[in-house]
Amino acid sequence: MNAVEFHNRPGARKPLESFLVHMHIAWTHLLQAEFERDGVSYYYRDRKSPTRYLKVDGERKSWELDRCVQERWVDPKDPVRNNLQLTIKLRNRIEHRYQAGLMVAAAGFTQALVINFEEELVAQFGPTYSIADQVHLPIALGTFSREGVVRLIAAQQGLPRKLHDFFIEYRSGFDSDVVNDRRFELRVDIVQKRAPRTDADLAVSFVQEEDLLPQERAAYAALEKTGRIILREKERPVSNLGRLRPKGVCEEVEGQIPFRFRHSAEFPVAWKHFRVRPAASARGKARRKTDERYCSYDEAHDDYVYTAAFIALLVRECGTPDGFRNVIGRDPTPQSANDSHRSDDEASGASGRVTAEGAYDES
C-alpha cells in the first residue's frame, strides 16, 4: 500500500525509487511467507559447514529477493520472474534527475508488478487476502491532453542512451511470448467511452482482443502504430475463475514433473495427504470444509475445484523421486513408460465416474 501511495502521490520526491523499494519489500515478505508455510528454509548456509547458517549481526542471513524469485519460478522464461528481475535491475540503475522519463518508460512494468503481486497473494493465500479494493484508480492528467502527452514523450526521449537501451536490451533477450505477456509488461490504450452510461458501468473498463470485430481490431491496430496497445487479457465475473478440476490439475502437474500423475490414481492420494478437502463420505456443511489456499467446494455441481497454488505445491513436492514417495507412498512411474502403465479409465478416455473415495465426475 505504501508503494502504490508513493507512486501515485502528486509532486512526490523519488516516486519510482520509493515505489520499487517498497514493492520489493512486499514481494520478499510474500515469497518468504510461502516458503514458511511450505517448510522451505530461506536462509543461506555456510559453504564450509553446511549444517550451519550464515549470520549477519547475529541473525541468520535470509535469501534476497532475486534468490527468492528464482526458487519460486524455476523457469527462466516465466513472465512474472522476468518482470521482477527487470524491476530489481531498474532499481539499481535509477538516476534521480531522469526520474520523470523513467516513470514513463517503466509504467508497463510497474503496473504489472502490482497486478502480479495481487494475483500471487490471492492464488497462494486465498481471496480474503485480496487488496484490490484498497488500490484505487489514480487520477491522471498527462495522457488526457495533447500538451501532456508531448511532455511525457519528451521526458522519455530525454533519457540517456544507457537507460533507454536498458529496456530495449532486456526485452531483446526473450521471445515474443514473454515480451507480449501482460505479466511481464502491461501496456494499454486509454480511449474515452462514448456509449450511453448504465448503472452497471465502471468509469474504466478493459477490452479483450478476441471479443473485437475485425474492423474494431483494425482500428485498434492503427492506434498501436502511434501509442500503446490495448490490454489483451481480462477477467470476467465467472464462477471458479482460474480454478481447475482434478483432470486439469493432473495435466498441469504432469507437464511440469517427469512422472505420471493421474486423476484416478495419484491425485486422490495427494489431496488426502495434504488434507485440502474433506473425505467423499462427508455430508452437509462438512463438505464445504476445505483448505481455501488450495481447494474450494462447488455447491452447484457438488464437487471440488483446485487453485494454481495447489498445482504449484504438487509440482514442488512431487517433482523428485523422494518427494513423490513421501506424498504418494510409492515409487513414481516415469512418463516415458509404455502404455501398459496407464490406468483403465485413461485408456477409455477418462469418461464416467471414478468410484474410489474422492469420486470425480468428468461431466
Image (cartoon, rainbow, N blue to C red):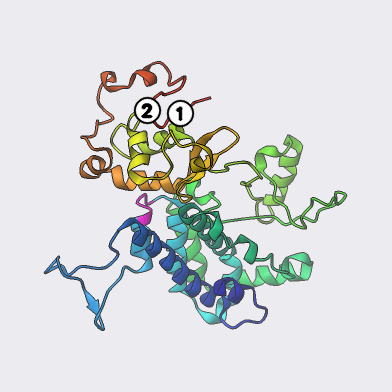
On the rendered structure, is 208 left or right of 123? right
**Of the residues shown, which amino acid type is indicated by label 1?**
Tyr
Q: Please report the residue visible at 47 percent of the width from the left and 59 percent of the height from the top.
A: 83
On the rendered structure, is 52 left or right of 98? left
Residue 346 badge: none
Instruction: Name the one closer to the observer, 146 or 258.
Output: 258
Q: What range of the chain is rendered magenta? A: 72-76
Earlier in the chain: of badge 2 and badge 1, it is: 2
Q: Please report the residue visible at 57 percent of the width from the left and 42 percent of the height from the top.
A: 240
Circle 2 SS class: loop
- The rendered magenta stretch, by its main secondary structure, is classed as loop
Q: Residue furthest top?
A: 348
For the N terminus, the quadrant is bottom right
In this rendering, does residue 268 appear at all?
yes
Crowding at dot 1, Cα within 10 Å, few <14 / some 14-19 / many 20+, comes out as many
Q: Residue 232: give x, y in percent of width and height.
A: 62, 46
Query: Mark 2 sits on what residue?
Result: 264
Q: Residue 201: give x, y in percent of width and height.
A: 79, 52
On the rendered structure, is 350 left or right of 40? right
Q: Residue 265: give x, y in percent of width and height.
A: 33, 29
Query: Mark 1 sits on what residue?
Result: 360
- Does 74 appear in magenta? yes
- Does 112 appear in magenta? no
Q: Residue 97: give x, y in percent of width and height.
A: 56, 82
**Residues marked 2 and 1 touching at CB (< 8 Å):** yes
Instruction: Name the one closer to the observer, 165 or 271.
Output: 271
Q: Please report the residue visible at 74 percent of the width from the left and 56 percent of the height from the top.
A: 204
Q: Please report the residue visible at 12 percent of the width from the left and 68 percent of the height from the top.
A: 49
